[in-house]
Image (spheres, rainbow, N blue to C red):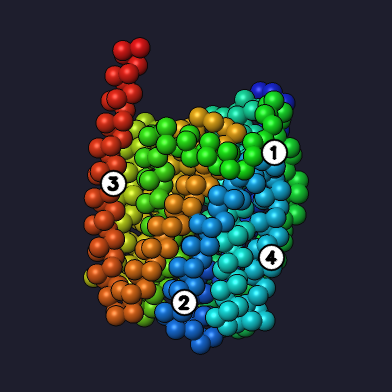
């Protein structure tokens, strides 16, 4: 099991350790969607076509774009904890809808509510954890805390998702019922988050000036924009590989439905290992390593095309290990690049909006490829595009660093 880095020196560190453990538990239960390995098959069995299924997913990402900035601003202006609590409660409602309404409309409403819920805690969760640790003198523990939270989420999937295919075969909606239960537990856990220590927070700005201020802060920080672009590539690949194409890939390899969850859990073991050991990358240069891992993820995903089931499993394992290593490092880099803590959740929501906008476009294009049976061509094109983008980002990051060093030497 991944351990939370903790220094038992002061009472503050003990309090921070408790918050980290509660955050781990929240991420574990809020991220435990039992239907994840089988939703594509379940929707098809309910009569939806591939076009309808991928249309729902495109709308899902576009809805994120509409929700993310407003909910991030709500978190910055009011309370990160309320966003975590509200998001978990909405997930409970979302997960029961397919039980009584397994139609295109029902699945669409479910995914729209999931978009709203995740937009509520997409920026608020990281912002709350970072601010709490920073204000209590435990900022150095942030990367390990994000890594352990991610690892606990994945451990929950390893333990529970192998049952998804068997549960679906027994009673189709059962994974949705169990998802509602675990999200309800997450809502209860969120009620116990302590308030942030007082930091002399300034009076909240009006909404439009606050948004304009966050955008100005982003534009002024070229480094932050580049790191967010890097994060977009990681997020898009993870969503494509673990959600959108995971089931179509396994169907193309003739794997029985009952084993979808087992294979997802098996590959998740590698993501857990990566998330729990991401701190070892610091010695190699964190930005450079995340760029390289992103390219590795794209190549691993494209490599499933010519391979059989065993080779596909190996590629998915490499993909998962790379994503587990990259995620907490990329989160830390972005948070460190934010120079205005009062706008942290809004800026993280802007990043999340960009993530979902790119995903919506990619899924829309992917649907066209899959409709004509051209998944191999899509994966090759995606790998090529990601590789070119990461090389370009590496050049831009180097130039940005050189300019900053020149300014510093002239000052």
Q: Earlier in the sequence, mark 2 or mark 4?
A: 2
**Mark 4 vs mark 1: in front:** 4
Question: Could you tell me if the residues under marks 1 and 2 are in contact, i.e. CB atoms within 8 Å?
Answer: no
Classify 69 as above or below 5.
below
- At 29% from the left and 53% from the top, the residue drawn is 386
Judge the density around disc 1: few (<14), some (14-19), many (≥20) Cα neighbours within 10 Å: some
Q: Earlier in the sequence, mark 1 or mark 2?
A: 1
Label 3 CA crowd tier, 10 Å (few <14, some 14–19, many 20+): many
Residue at the spot of label 1? 18
Quarter of the image where one finds residue 145? top right
User: For this rendering, which residue is in front, 195 or 178?
Assistant: 195
Alpha carbons under labels 2 and 4: distance apart: 22 Å
Are the two marked residues, 4 and 1, in contact with CB atoms closer than 8 angstroms? no
Report which residue position mark 4 lands on.
92
Separation (CA) of disc 4 from disc 3? 38 Å
- Report the side of 321 relative to 134 (left or right): left
Tell me the element at label 3: helix
Assign the C terminus to one quadrant of the image: top left
Q: Position of residue 27 (x, y in %)?
A: 61, 52
Q: CA distance from mark 4 to mark 1?
A: 25 Å
How many numbered marks have been drawn onto this rendered protein structure? 4
Residue 53: give its label.
2
Q: Secondary structure at mark 4?
A: helix
| Residue 347, x across and y down, in percent | 52, 41
Measured along the vertical axis of the image, is residue 255 above or below residue 272?
A: below
Residue at position x 48%, y 40% from top? Answer: 215
Task: Give the label on residue 390, or none.
Answer: 3
Residue 278 at x, y = what percent?
44, 41
């Amino acid at each position: 099991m991944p351990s939370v880095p903790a220094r038992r020196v002061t009472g503050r560190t003990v309090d921070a350790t408790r918050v980290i453990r509660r955050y781990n538990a929240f991420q574990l239960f809020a991220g435990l969607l039992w239907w994840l390995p089988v939703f594509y098959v379940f929707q098809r069995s309910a009569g939806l076509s591939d076009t309808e299924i991928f249309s729902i997913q495109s709308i899902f990402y576009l809805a994120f774009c509409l929700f993310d900035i407003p909910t991030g601003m709500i978190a910055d202006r009011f309370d990160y904890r309320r966003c975590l609590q509200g998001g978990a409660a909405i997930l409970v409602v979302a997960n029961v809808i397919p039980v009584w309404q397994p139609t295109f409309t029902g699945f669409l409403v479910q995914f729209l509510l999931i978009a709203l819920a995740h937009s509520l805690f997409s920026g608020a969760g990281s912002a709350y954890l970072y601010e709490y640790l920073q204000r209590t003198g435990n900022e150095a523990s942030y990367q390990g805390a994000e890594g352990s939270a991610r690892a606990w989420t994945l451990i929950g999937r390893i333990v529970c998702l192998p049952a998804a295919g068997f549960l679906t075969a027994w009673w189709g909606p059962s994974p949705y019922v169990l998802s509602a239960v675990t999200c309800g537990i997450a809502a209860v856990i969120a009620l116990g988050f302590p308030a942030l220590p007082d930091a002399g927070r300034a009076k909240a700005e009006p909404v439009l000036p606050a948004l304009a201020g966050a955008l100005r802060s982003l534009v002024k920080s070229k480094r932050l924009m580049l790191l967010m672009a890097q994060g977009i590539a990681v997020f898009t690949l993870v969503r494509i590989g673990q959600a959108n194409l995971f089931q179509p890939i396994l169907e193309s390899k003739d794997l029985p439905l009952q084993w979808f969850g087992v294979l997802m859990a098996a590959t998740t073991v590698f993501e857990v290992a990566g998330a729990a050991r991401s701190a070892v990358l610091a010695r190699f240069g964190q930005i450079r390593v995340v760029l390289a891992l992103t390219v590795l993820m794209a190549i691993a995903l494209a490599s499933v095309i010519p391979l059989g089931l065993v080779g596909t499993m190996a590629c998915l394992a490499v993909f998962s290990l790379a994503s587990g290593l990259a995620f907490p490092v990329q989160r830390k880099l972005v948070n460190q690049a934010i120079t205005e803590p009062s706008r942290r959740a809004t800026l993280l929501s802007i990043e999340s909006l960009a993530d979902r906008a790119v995903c919506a476009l990619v899924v829309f294009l992917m649907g066209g490829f899959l409709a004509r049976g051209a998944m191999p061509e899509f994966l090759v094109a995606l790998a090529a595009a990601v590789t070119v983008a990461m090389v370009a980002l590496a050049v831009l990051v180097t130039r940005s660093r050189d300019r900053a060093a020149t300014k510093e030497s002239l000052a």
